[in-house]
Structures are given as structure tokens and as C-alpha cells.
Amino acid sequence: MNQEIFYFLNNIASQYVWLDNLIIFCAQWLPFLIIGIFVGYCALRAFSFEARNTWRDEPIWKGFLRKFSIIFGSTFLIWGVSQIINHFYYSPRPFILLEDLNVLFTHGNGDSFPSGHATFFFSLAFTSYYYCHKWIFNLLLIGAVIVSFSRIISGVHWPLDILGALVLSLVGVYLIRKIIPNK
């Protein structure tokens, strides 16, 4: 079933040059844009307030900086777990195993499961759900889905790589939320 879903999505590639360019952009460059928008949001949010937190009598930017640290710390921790899994569980990428597919670009040789890109961006989105405005969560989640699907369409990941990253991100954020509650 993994291979059938892969072929269904991968057959979207190599139909139109403009679509291939869009898929490559979403798979390789959209992640940088998402991070830039999120860091910009955090910087504006942290440093645009002069008010003080009334119940802690501290500048609001300190609380937001704490949230920013939790979001990125959690995201990198969960991504690190995905890299450990990659190290111990070898899953070859589709372009290594299959011959009749549309490869828009190659990326690494192995370490396909779970997808590092999907793990990072789903973790970033799910963690931001608890610490940011909901529109940021929605934007990050949509970005994670677009990046993930474009990596399948371009031939560098299996659908199960993305599903594994999604599950790892959900479990990781759940466990981190048990350790670090939202205060």
C-alpha cells in the first residue's frame, strides 16, 4: 500500500515544468521560508511589547522568549530522536529502490524513515499550538503538510516516512507537554 500511494502521488511529477518547479520549491525552499516567517513572528512578538506581565511583574518579552525556547528546543529534540531512528533503522529512499518513478531531485542515500523535514515541521507546528496564536499554528501545519507531500511527489520519501514523522511529532509533543506544562 505504501508503494501504491507513493506512485499515485509521484505520478503528479513530470507532467508540467511549472508544477515540477513548484514542487521542488515546496520540498527544498519552502522550509526556509517557513522558518523565516516563524522567527520573524517571534521576534516581532517578543520585542514589540513594552508592557509588563501583571501577575509576574516581568517584561512580556521574557515570557515569550521562554515560549520561543520551548518551541525550538522541543522541535530540535524530537528531530534529534528522528535522526537517532534514522541511524539505527535503514530505510532506502524510493529513488534507490524503484526504477520507474519521477525523481525531481535526489537527497541523501538512505535515512528515509522517518522524514527529518516532516518531523521538524510537524513538531514545530504542534508545539506552536500551545504557545502561539492559532493562525501561526495553522500556517505551520499547512506548511508541514505541503512540504511533506511535495517530498513524496518529488520522489525522495515514502508515505510511511511522513506518517512515521507525524506520529513521532505527536508523541514527542505530547510527552514534552507532560514535562513542561503551559504556564
Image (cartoon, rainbow, N blue to C red):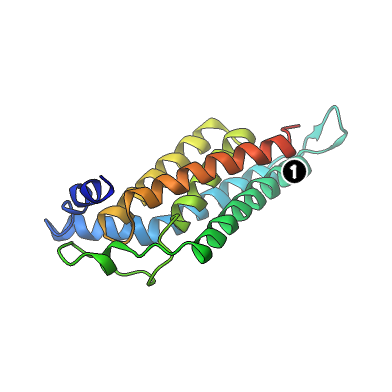
Judge the density around disc 1: few (<14), some (14-19), many (≥20) Cα neighbours within 10 Å: many
The vertical placement of 154 against 149, above or below, is: below
Q: Nearer the viewer, residue 59 or 120?
A: 120
The total number of labels drawn is 1
Residue lying farthest to the left in this orientation: 15
Q: Choose top left, top right, bottom left or bottom right for residue 62.
A: top right
In the rendering, at what x and y percent does residue 36 appear?
51, 55
Q: Choose top left, top right, bottom left or bottom right for residue 45.
A: top right
Q: Is residue 179 left or right of residue 149?
A: right
Q: Is residue 61 left or right of residue 10?
A: right
Helix, strand or loop status at disc 1? helix
> Which residue is tagged 1?
61
Q: Is residue 96 visible?
A: yes
In the rendering, at what x and y percent does residue 161 appear?
39, 52
Residue lying farthest to the right in this orientation: 57
Location of the C terminus by quadrant is: top right
Residue lying farthest to the bottom in this orientation: 109
In the rendering, at what x and y percent does residue 132 appear?
60, 36
Location of the N terminus by quadrant is: top left
Residue lying farthest to the top in this orientation: 55
The vertical placement of 183 against 23, above or below, is: above
The vertical placement of 43 against 98, above or below, is: above
Image point (52%, 46%), residue name: 168
Q: Is residue 116 left or right of residue 180?
A: left
Q: Choose top left, top right, bottom left or bottom right for residue 179.
A: top right
Image point (45%, 54%), residue name: 114
Residue type indicated by callout 1: Trp
In the rendering, at what x and y percent does residue 147 appear?
37, 51
Image point (35%, 65%), residue name: 92
Q: Is residue 104 visible?
A: no
